[in-house]
Image (tube, rainbow, N blue to C red):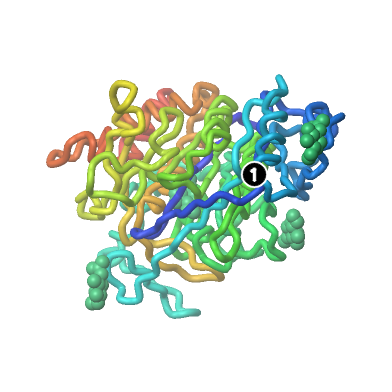
Amino acid sequence: MNVFTILVTISVIWGLDAFKTSIIPNEFIVHFHSKYFAPVRESFIKAKLFGSNITNWKIIPRENLAWQYPSDFDVLKVLTDDEKSAKLIIERIQSHPSVKAVVPQRSVRRILNYNPYGNFTSINRHPQGVTRIRNANNDRHRQVCSALHANVLWKLGITGKGVKVAIFDTGLTKNHPHFRNVKERTNWTNEKSLDDKVSHGTFVAGVIASSRECLGFAPDADLYIFKVFTNSQVSYTSWFLDAFNYAIYRKINILNLSIGGPDFMDSPFVEKVLELSANNVIMISAAGNDGPLYGTLNNPGDQSDVIGVGGIQFDDKIAKFSSRGMTTWELPSGYGRLGLDIVTYGSQVEGSDVRKGCRRLSGTSVSSPVVAGVAALLISGAFKRIDLINPASLKQVLIEGAEKLPQYNMFEQGAGKLNLLKTLNPCTMEAPWLLQT
Ligand SMILES: *[C@@H]1O[C@H](CO)[C@@H](O)[C@H](O)[C@H]1NC(C)=O
Ligand SMILES: *[C@@H]1O[C@H](CO)[C@@H](O)[C@H](O)[C@H]1NC(C)=O
Ligand SMILES: *[C@@H]1O[C@H](CO)[C@@H](O)[C@H](O)[C@H]1NC(C)=O
Ligand SMILES: *[C@H]1O[C@H](CO)[C@@H](O)[C@H](O)[C@H]1NC(C)=O
């Protein structure tokens, strides 16, 4: 129905998460200017290598759902360890007018820091099988949905219906009891199962859309689960690019992407983020967990087309781990940008656990799904103004509705603290009664 996709990009959940990227030897991403079917792409590559005695290369087939559609890249394997011949192959392919660039294939590994002591980055699992009865006074502070008054919208029947949210993460267990509307679980790794064995992906999905126990913001949103990380938290540039392309074909509204980090700045990855935004996919990404130093924002949360989210505690203090602006990579060519758009709860937040029950996590990757869930809710409640919502206007209303935290500067808080009800106002101008609560 509607045309948005909310893409939640890059989410680092644990306070001490880190990403480590490395180059895969002899594997390259051949990036084309446009999208073509596989035989056409192969003909471009062959055109430049044909007639020479260069035969020590092959295109690696990618058996996934994106394969049926035109694509803008191939993965090329060079079957020689001789650097000179490898270089020759790459140079020849690069000289084809339809080829934009040839870059190394990278792997990215997300390093999770489980803290057994229960402090700071702790993960407090509830005892298995015990349903927690939430006492409003005790536990309210960890319920992000009530802290942001999502129930005001739920009472009006606004629950995320019709909004497609994609979650790029570690998968989700089939028939998890917290979720009503899992539309699709898709496979982008080489693993046999789509289940989440890490619990990262489940937690993110829970903050966005859980309908039981620990509640998420938009329980009726359509969830598209993209398993792009293996159970050992590894992913590849090509897995992400294929999954992004598929999300565009599926007309996803909101995409939850859980990758990123300061080093994941491959040109095809960054350009894909811009392409998604041009296709009306709303992208929300964590600012990073590299605070409290300034200039520590992560890509792509710091890009203009992406909503970059920092973390605060339930007492409105900015979390120490939350990355601060400004952007530093632009400094050599002039000046940096603020880079950080907004802050919201990201410390000791409750969300769904792998099979059932809840757990608490901290990190700006907790804050990012909070904004994604809020975005899904706002879009589904925008009524007649829904056609006016796009990545830029959504960012604008979030920024305008944000509340300044008096004791912090803009590099720490961006436009300030997310305020769901104030943000709702411009989205639903013809329904001002929504705000009289
Ligand atoms: C074929 O290979 C030889 C030796 O590897 C090389 O000297 C020669 O230039 C190559 N010919 C072409 C057309 O690339
Ligand atoms: C958590 O507690 C442990 C043990 O008390 C301590 O060693 C560790 O430094 C603490 N970590 C943080 C981040 O406070
Ligand atoms: C995912 O795809 C790979 C091939 O790319 C395959 O080996 C694996 O079994 C698939 N996993 C699932 C759950 O379908
Ligand atoms: C997507 O998932 C990551 C964690 O994997 C999380 O940090 C991020 O906030 C999520 N984004 C959304 C929109 O849910």
Depth check: give the residue in front, 70 or 246.
70
Residue at 36% of width from left, 43% of height from top?
287
Q: Is residue 147 above or below residue 113?
A: above
Depth check: give the residue in front, 53 or 208.
53
Along the horizontal axis of the image, is 49 left or right of 332?
right
Expressed as whole percent of the image width and height from the top left, the position of residue 341 reads 33, 34
Residue at 66% of width from left, 32% of height from top?
31
Please say whether residue 42 is visible from this viewpoint: no
Q: Is residue 193 above or below residue 319?
A: below
For the residue labelled by badge 1, is the local secondary structure a helix, a strand or a loop?
Answer: helix
Residue type at mark 1 is: Glu
Can you say which quadrant of the picture contains the C terminus? top left
Along the horizontal axis of the image, is 303 left or right of 120?
right
Expressed as whole percent of the image width and height from the top left, the position of residue 195 reads 63, 65
Q: Quadrant of residue 5?
A: top right
Can you say which quadrant of the picture contains the N terminus? top right
Tag 1: Cα neighbours inside 10 Å, few (<14), some, or many (≥20)?
A: few
Q: Is residue 243 above or below residue 273?
A: below
- View extreme (left): residue: 407
Q: Which residue is mark 1?
A: 83
Along the horizontal axis of the image, is 305 left or right of 196?
left
Expressed as whole percent of the image width and height from the top left, the position of residue 10 reads 47, 46
Along the horizontal axis of the image, is 149 left or right of 376?
left
The quarter of the rendering in which ligand 1 is drawn is top right
Expressed as whole percent of the image width and height from the top left, the position of residue 3 reads 61, 29
Residue at 69% of width from left, 23% of height from top?
95
Please say whether residue 256 is visible from this viewpoint: yes
How many marks the image carries: the answer is: 1
Q: Is mark 1 within 8 Å of ligand 1?
A: no
